[in-house]
Image (tube, rainbow, N blue to C red):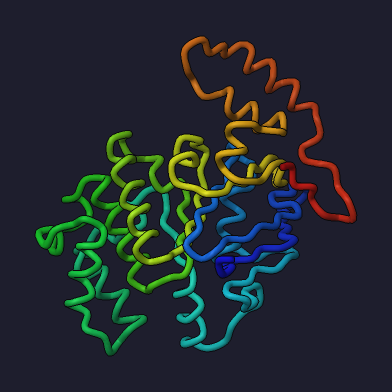
Amino acid sequence: MAETVLHVSGLHRRYGSVRAVDDVSFSLARGGSLGIVGESGSGKTTTARIVVGLEAPDEGHIRIRGDERTGRVRGRAARLARAREIQMVFQDPFLSLDPRVSVEAALRETLRLHFPGADHARRIAELLDQVGLGSRAREALPRQLSGGQRQRVAIARALAVEPAILVLDEAVAALDVSVQAQILNLLADIRAETGVGYLFITHDLGVVRCVTDDVIVMRQGRIVEAGATERVLASPQHPYTRLLLESVPRPGWDPHAIAAARRALHHAPAGPDRTNGQSTVLN
């Protein structure tokens, strides 16, 4: 059995009367790849932000390599150590990079902060090679790079701290289809080489099919289905999962039938039956 690097249990988050995250639990193994899918408002991005530490849960526990992360830490060293455990790559690499800072300077700043005594020049060269960027990109500013190149820089910066987990929030959604394929292949290679675990947040079932081992489907803050990606996509058990799959345009696709199914589901309960306060995972 592979080591469990991330364990999330009983996560809750409310905004007023809205249950953005409602009793969400899952685990990620070392070197594994888990997808969280759902439409806008399903709670997937809020879940990711809580896991990374950008938001605090109302209830629940997050453990990385067995260590609790839901409490606050004191001291700069402890905060940096926690940041190294898990990193996030956002949808828009242009917004996540400082437009005034070159690729080399951005990587050097990260390395200086976390590894002040290391050989930064050597590590920068390794990172650029790892994400498929040549030495010519070192001095480039974000505006001088393509969208795919900027996302490679964002991935390199996240990998610079040698995280156990990389959270990718719609990380290829803003890219052209051909560039998406390049980035997804890159991520697959990096996972095989380093053993980093991936948490993919996406609405794109094609991405889920290509790069995840397991998937959970969220609707209105709850997990409605979970399991091996191949099984869930081939034989979905929950009506919402079936609706997501049927909503992908293809020959013979009937948008009117999809709209009718969506209206019918809107009046159905949001999640699975509850037993002793726990979600029933559909397999």
Residue occupying image coordinates x 50% and y 58%: 32
Quadrant (top left/top right/bottom left/bottom right) for the N terminus? bottom right
Question: What x and y, as percent, mark residue 62?
Answer: 65, 68
Relative to 238, 79 lies left or right: left
Nearer the observer, 81 or 29: 29
**Is residue 268 placed above or below 24 in the rendered structure?**
above
Which quadrant would residue 124 be assigned to in this image? Answer: bottom left
Question: What x and y, as percent, mark residue 251?
Answer: 47, 12
**Is residue 114 placed above or below 41 in the rendered structure?**
below
**Is residue 230 placed above or below 51 in the rendered structure?**
above
Residue occupying image coordinates x 59% and y 82%: 73
Which quadrant would residue 254 be assigned to in this image? Answer: top right
Which quadrant would residue 49 be assigned to in this image? Answer: bottom right
Question: What x and y, as percent, mark residue 31?
Answer: 47, 62
Residue occupying image coordinates x 28% and y 40%: 179
Is residue 277 at all visible to an observer of this figure?
A: yes
Quadrant (top left/top right/bottom left/bottom right) for the C terminus? top right
Relative to 5, 138 lies left or right: left
Q: Given the current orientation, which residue lies at the most extreme front position?
A: 1
Residue occupying image coordinates x 71% and y 54%: 24
Nearer the observer, 41 or 100: 41
Nearer the observer, 107 or 164: 164
Relative to 189, 283 lies left or right: right
Is residue 54 at all visible to an observer of this figure?
A: no
**Is residue 213 placed above or below 198 in the rendered structure?**
above
Relative to 217, 12 lies left or right: right
Q: Given the current orientation, which residue lies at the most extreme right position?
A: 276
Nearer the observer, 148 or 14: 148
